[in-house]
Image (cartoon, rainbow, N blue to C red):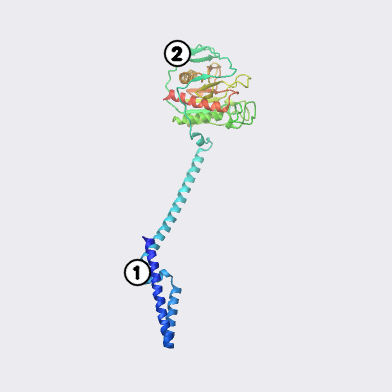
Amino acid sequence: MFNVTVLRLKDIVKYIISIFVFILLIFSISNYFSGTKENTQEVTQQIENVTNEISNHSLLSCLDATLPVVASINHNEENEKQKLSENDILKSMLETQISSIDEIQNMAEVSEGGETENTSEEEQGVELAETGGTTEVITNNPITESYNAQYGNVKIKNQTDYELTQEMLTPDITIDNKNIMIFHTHSCESYTSSELYPYTPTGNFRTTDLNFTVTRVGTELTTQLQQYGYNVIHDTSYHDYPSYNGSYTNSLKTVESLLQTNPSDIIIDLHRDAIGSRSDYAPTVRIGDEEAAQIMFVIGTNAGGLWHPNWNQNLKFAIKVQEKAEELYPGLFKPIMLTTSRYNQHTGKYANIIEVGATGNTLEQCLTSMKYLAKVMDEIMK
């Protein structure tokens, strides 16, 4: 509607100008023939007045004075422009403030994280384990399994003098405190370098770059368990660097400190198996189309003379987990190793060592294992 009005005003302006020119022409002819000087001066003065008026005012102001409707339209248009301008300014200010608030929140989230790991990328598109597929052990040049005790399908290599009774093996435990703590006594244990995860060793299958060690495997287990809703504390401190000696003393201090503010029954010391001198030993299982490193529980006792009253509870927990694993993914676990050492497992009701893969496994195989381990743990804690 507004565009149509403008076109009509142009026609009116043309019409007025035509009349004005025509009147000037009549006056000029009249003055020419009359020869009256006074009339000529009067007409000249009128022309100058009109010229000055046009020079001092825009066409729109002239039309405003002549046509009140035009004045009203122009006035409304100016008000709308002013409103739009004010709205743009307010919008710009709000967008700036919102952007600043978002930036502050992002900075606060990073600050709150402190030394905890950045898991934003890990949590995006996390793939959880499925069940129902086929599972088979595919280890090349395997080391023969040995065990001397068994509960159902769970095999146990008992290295102590304790005679394991049926009552000692029955996993009749109830997990009330489902907080989970994960740490690494040997933080620098690494795997065979691969195309996907190449790294520079700083020792014999060891590196101080924790992105390529068993610590990275702990990060994966943490992420997986969190997807099931569990509260997980993952400590990534060095305990075997710069000195390997005293690793268990160092990790004990860490665990005792964390327990003061994060009471947990389930305490996992995540390792890589360092069995023998064979660097090519890679205990592996195929689950569906994926290759995963085999896992092994190492459970300590008080047989070595150190105080450890709850070791049987730790063993029952390992049997409970492995029993479910044999049901869902048979072969994922190797036989449980029951030892005479304590390994700091007196700190928790269900404390344990879990060894993931060996030197011949790749990091990706070990990361895959954590998906299935998390699924098994969730099944027994539902």
In this picture, residue 90 sits left or right of residue 192: left
Residue 257 visible from this viewpoint: no
Picture residue at 43% right of the left edge, 79% below the top: 47
Q: Quadrant of residue 5?
A: bottom left
Tell me the quarter of the image containing the N terminus.
bottom left
**Closest to the observer, 230 or 334:** 334
Residue 60 visible from this viewpoint: yes
Seen in the picture, residue 68 relative to 313 is either above or below; the reply is below
Q: Quadrant of residue 204?
A: top right
In this picture, residue 142 sits left or right of residue 83: right
SS type, badge 2 = helix
Q: Residues within 10 Å of mark 2 (few under 14, many from 20)?
A: few
What amino acid does circle 1 point to? Pro
Q: Position of residue 276 (x, y in %)?
A: 62, 19
Q: Are marks 2 and 1 in contact (CB under 8 Å)?
A: no
Seen in the picture, residue 251 relative to 141 is either above or below; the reply is below
Q: Residues within 10 Å of mark 1 (few under 14, many from 20)?
A: few
Among the two numbered marks 2 and 1 on one chain, the one whose residue lies closer to the N terminus: 1
Q: Give the residue pinned by disc 1.
A: 68
Tell me the quarter of the image containing the C terminus.
top left
Residue 167 marker: 2
